[in-house]
Image (cartoon, coloured by chain):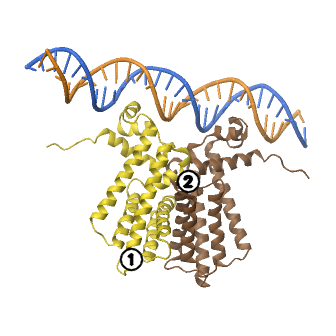
Chain colours: A yellow, B brown, C blue, D orange
Amino acid sequence: MEVAIQKDTKQSILDIAEDLLHQKGYNAFSYKDIAVALGIKNASIHYYFPSKEDLGEAVVLYAFEKLKKLQEKAQAKNLSPPEELDFFLSIYQHYLEKKLKIGLIGTLAVNFAAIPEKMQIAGQKITQTCIAWLQSILEKGRASQTLRFEGDSFAQALLILASLEGALQIARLTDNQHFYQIVGQLRNSLILSITI
Amino acid sequence: MEVAIQKDTKQSILDIAEDLLHQKGYNAFSYKDIAVALGIKNASIHYYFPSKEDLGEAVVLYAFEKLKKLQEKAQAKNLSPPEELDFFLSIYQHYLEKKLKIGLIGTLAVNFAAIPEKMQIAGQKITQTCIAWLQSILEKGRASQTLRFEGDSFAQALLILASLEGALQIARLTDNQHFYQIVGQLRNSLILSITI
DNA sequence: TCAAATCTACCTACTAATAGGTAGATAAGC
DNA sequence: GCTTATCTACCTATTAGTAGGTAGATTTGA
């Protein structure tokens, strides 16, 4: 059994494209950027992704798959509502700490009028999945009296998601520490237990 | 006294550039887009804004000026803390309802690695001004027992700003109505009075 | 088995379009 | 006549995308 020295080229292209999408936005990166990073030629990327639209859509669909796997993973763990909420928050914390730095929803929304329709639609699906997931956590938390919030669980789910997307953006413009302050403030208002 | 039939060209360029920046992001609009919209030639825009960096910075500085004027206007009105908070929220509501649709902070953050340094710095100033304004509202509200929140007023200000930026983005990806739901949820948690 | 056929994963070399930007002419108005 | 504002006519760099080729691995089949 041999160790894979080199990642699959197609996967590497996807990873770098995801990176660039988060760092610069869809219209600010080019095939050349990816080609240079990988040490291959422009045309080779067209071999895997005939058009930039194909690549853009693939990046979003790939992110969608990852999100769904995380959701399954969380459900398999049988977490308490506060723990599952923290699991969701940790996804965004991972965005901050790793290369991505900005949420996909924010990226797609800001460049909405300048991205292909397939990316728009995929972005909408991701958003709806996030909202539904958060809402289910909130409902379970309210039923078990482990999470505290007022009003509609859907509206509260929207508020949490908006806060996280916004938090990453404020962090990028000012200071990473501000992300943690926002998440802390959010957690304090939601989680009933005294333990941190 | 004559009615101004035509707006000042420089101002029109700024307005359209602001529009395009919010709709597509910095790297997805071109001088040509503006020239076509105004019915002038590409080169004429270079006359007012020699480089795209100049234009980009001018748009952000112009937005900064508008923000400061709104802040002065609010202070001149001697509003109660909940009223001043609503004034701030109404700025974002205006973003949603008018042409802009996305907050400037979000736009600049998402394309951060792909915008000129001067835009980055101007964006940071706007963010800090917003945070400081919100924090002052929160402090006054807590002192006068008209606003309710726990913990640090700075962290709470960050949370509100993040929510609003994220709310615009979720609204763009899904439904404008979601913006109002987020703002409603936020108001309910902050404002102590029963009256809406 | 071994040669032909096919496929994979790139390459070089190109195109058409668009980007931001510039030089210099020109028209209009004080 | 000088300034302001706008034009025509470019330039250079970059973009996404295409055409066609090729070395080497893999599959097929007589």
Relative height, residue B110 to residue B141 (above, below): above
Horizontal and vertical percent for residue B112?
Answer: 51, 52
Structural crowding at the residue carrying mark 2, measured as other residues with C-alpha within 10 Å and reported as few (<14), some (14–19) or many (≥20): many
Residue that appears at 70% across and 71% down: B74
* Front-lying residue, D24 or B165: B165
Q: Is residue A108 left or right of residue C8?
A: right
Are both tags, 2 and 1, on one chain?
A: no
Q: Amino acid at mark 1?
A: Ala
Name the chain under label 2.
B
Secondary element at image label 1: helix
Horizontal and vertical percent for residue B100?
Answer: 63, 54
Question: What is the spatial separation of the Cα atoms under label 2 and label 1, in whole angstroms?
Answer: 38 Å
Horizontal and vertical percent for residue B62?
Answer: 68, 55
Say which residue label 2 marks. Answer: B107
Residue A65 shows in the view: yes
Residue A18 shows in the view: no
Name the chain under label 1.
A
Query: Label for residue B97?
Result: none
Secondary element at image label 2: helix
Structural crowding at the residue carrying mark 1, measured as other residues with C-alpha within 10 Å and reported as few (<14), some (14–19) or many (≥20): few
Query: Viewer-nearest of labels 2 and 1?
Result: 1
Q: Is residue D1 left or right of residue A123?
A: right
Say which residue label 1 marks. Answer: A143
* Front-lying residue, B71 or C21: B71
Q: Quadrant of residue A76?
A: bottom left
Relative height, residue A37 to residue A99 (above, below): above
Q: Amino acid at mark 2?
A: Thr
Please identify the quadrant where the C terminus of chain B is shown. Answer: bottom right
Mark 2 in CB contact with mark 1 (< 8 angstroms): no
Residue that appears at 42% across and 60% down: A130
